[in-house]
Image (tube, rainbow, N blue to C red):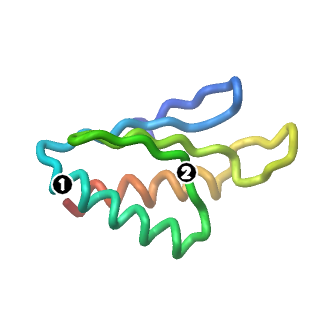
Amino acid sequence: MDKWNERTRPLRLERRFEFSTYELTRDFLERLGELCEKRKRFPDISFGKTYVNLTLMPESEEQNAQLTDEDQNFASEIDRLEEKR
């Protein structure tokens, strides 16, 4: 989790993943898509040829929502996708 940056306005977690090739980027995005469908959780995603930027907002949509253990667990699951490349 130390690779994720916590921001406060609005509250969110952010991380940039970098890859050496487009094929590795695409593979990561495919595995991320599968995980998101499984978890029914969808981060904001931007990407280019060799990078992916992710933003995770608190799962709760309440106005004063806080990041929870479940949010942290989801981020850790995403981290494990990078380890599988």
User: x and y percent of residue 21 in the render?
Assistant: 12, 47
Under mark 2, the amino acid is Pro
Look at the picture and state if 25 lies above or below 11: below
Binning the other alpha carbons within 10 Å of mark 2 as few (below 14), some (14 to 19) or many (20 upward) gives: some
Name of the residue lying farthest toward the right: 63
Residue at screen point 21% across, 41% down: 50
Q: Name the residue under label 1.
A: 24
Name of the residue lying farthest toward the top: 9
Q: Mark 2 points at which residue?
A: 43
Look at the picture and state if 85 lies above or below 22: below
63 on left or right of 21: right
Residue at disc 2, secondary structure:
loop
38 on left or right of 84: right
User: x and y percent of residue 5 in the render?
Assistant: 50, 30
Residue at disc 1, secondary structure:
helix
2 on left or right of 6: left
Binning the other alpha carbons within 10 Å of mark 1 as few (below 14), some (14 to 19) or many (20 upward) gives: some
Under mark 1, the amino acid is Leu
Residue at screen point 80% across, 49% down: 61
User: x and y percent of residue 18 in the render?
Assistant: 25, 39
